[in-house]
Each structure stands twice: as structure tokens, then as C-alpha cells.
Image: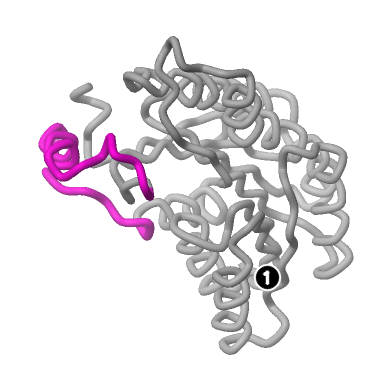
Amino acid sequence: MHGKTALITGGAKRVGAASARMLHAAGANLMIHYRSSATEARALQDELNAIRADSVALIQADLHDTSGLPSLVHQTVATFGGLDVLLNNASSFYPTPVGTIAEKDWADLMGSNLKAPMFLSQAAAPELRKRRGCIINITDIHADRPMKSYVVYSVAKAGLVGLTKSLARELAPEVRVNGIAPGPIMWPEGDSNFDQVSRQRIVSHTMLKRAGDPADIALAVRFFAMDTHFVTGQILAVDGGRSAKL
């Protein structure tokens, strides 16, 4: 990926940071978006720029404000001269059981998981077409089989799967659009629904009998970014076989 540029939303931590390291190691320049994780974002920028000077820039934005999304693309192009990969990774995740769902939950979860990827992809499409680039969306195995008590999140991720396939048709043949559906990779921070017993139960339902690692998702990101010139409109489950047993 030498000479190519990737824009990663939610790139400061967890899967986003692992993907940033993976693409950077392959030679890409990075524009890393963050919302509130400034400390982690700056630490990652310093780490990667120490390896290759001026190869990583940061941009702070609230993705719910769709009017500001084109500026992420414009600043990426202004900094690095183009855009080759858009990784829609940023995501809100928390339970919304029926009877407790408020409009703010709907706006937040649909906003981060579906609305922002839609409008950011739309803004990025002209630049991606110029460079015959790609869009990679981080979906979820529960887009197909919703997770109990996570109604809005599951609906939003199902929408993102539909968006992935729709954009693949809309942007072909210049731009490839694919999705990655993680299974148990990193346990959610501060969610009491994922106590030790719940984690063990989830892992027991995988064929490989273990949780994955952010690097597993990052490898799939690199695969779609670099090695799949004849693949578009596809969703790759990276879940230890869990979706086959759901």
C-alpha cells in the first residue's frame, strides 16, 4: 500500500487502532478519526510517525453531524493527496431492550452505525473513484441474527449490511465495497451483560472455542484493502465459526 491513503473512523482504539497499525505496516498513510479519544489517538499517531515520519494525521469529529463529514475527506486529500481506502469502523454499542428505547438511543445507534457510514461514503466516493479505491464497513454477525436486548444496534448493523451491498452496486466498477462481521473479539467496555459467565457461554458457541483478537479483524481489513481486486458486495464473518452455530 505504499503511496496509498486510508481514512479510518474510530481509529484510536481497539479494532480501529489494530487496523491502523496493520495498514501502516503495509505502507499506507493514515488519517485517523476520533471523537473523544484524543489521548489514545495522539499516542498512536506518535507511535506510527516514529516509524515513518509524517505518515499519520488526526482529525476530530462528531460523526453524528453529517454536515461535517465531507471535511474528513477534504482534509485527507489535502494532507496526503488522495484517498484509497475508507474504513467505516466507528460504532456505538449498548443494550436497548424493548420498553426502554428512547429516540436518543435510536439517533445515536443509527447515527454512528448506519447514517455516518452512508454520508461519509457518499462524500468519499468521488475521490475513491479517482483512485479505484475501496470502502470497508465493520458490520456484525448479529446483523443477520439479532442479539437479544440490543434491538437498535442489531437493526443498525443490519442496515449497514444492506448499505454495503447497495454501495457495491452503486459505485462499481471503480470502487469495491465490502464488510467485515466480527464475532467475539474484544468484550465491550463497561457492559454488565458481558460478565464472565456470559463470555464463557459466547466463546463456547464458537467452533474454535476462543475469543478473537483485534488483529484478526485488522488482517481482514488488509485483505479487502490490498488483495481482493475481484471481490465486492461481500460480508466476511471473522468470528471463530460462531455465526455458523447461531
- Give the farthest residue toward the top: 99
Query: Is 105 covered by the magenta stretch?
Result: no
Q: Write the residue at 40% across / 23% down.
A: 150
Classify 34 as above or below 79: above
Q: Quick check: 55 above or below 242?
A: below
Tell me the quarter of the picture where residue 148 sits.
Answer: top left
Question: Is residue 193 shown in magenta?
Answer: yes
Q: Nearer the viewer, residue 243 or 47?
A: 47
Question: Which element carries disc 1, helix, strand or loop?
Answer: strand
Front-lying residue, 84 or 194? 194
Residue of label 1: 29
Quarter of the image where the C terminus is located: top left
Compared with 92, 215 (above or below) is: below
Q: Position of residue 2 (x, y in %)?
A: 65, 72
Identify which amino acid the numbered label 1 is placed on.
Asn
Which segment did they paint magenta?
189-215
Residue 105 percent location from the top left of the image: 57, 26
Image quarter (top left, top right, bottom left or bottom right) of the N terminus: bottom right
Residue 245, picture quadrant: top left
Q: How many marks?
A: 1
Kindly identify the residue that appears in the image at 44 percent across and 22 percent down: 96
Q: Residue at x 80, y 61 (%)?
A: 76
Left or right, 3 with respect to 127, comes to: left
Residue 214 position within the rendered picture, expressed as x and y whole percent measured from the top left: 37, 56
Residue 141: x %, y % from top left: 37, 29
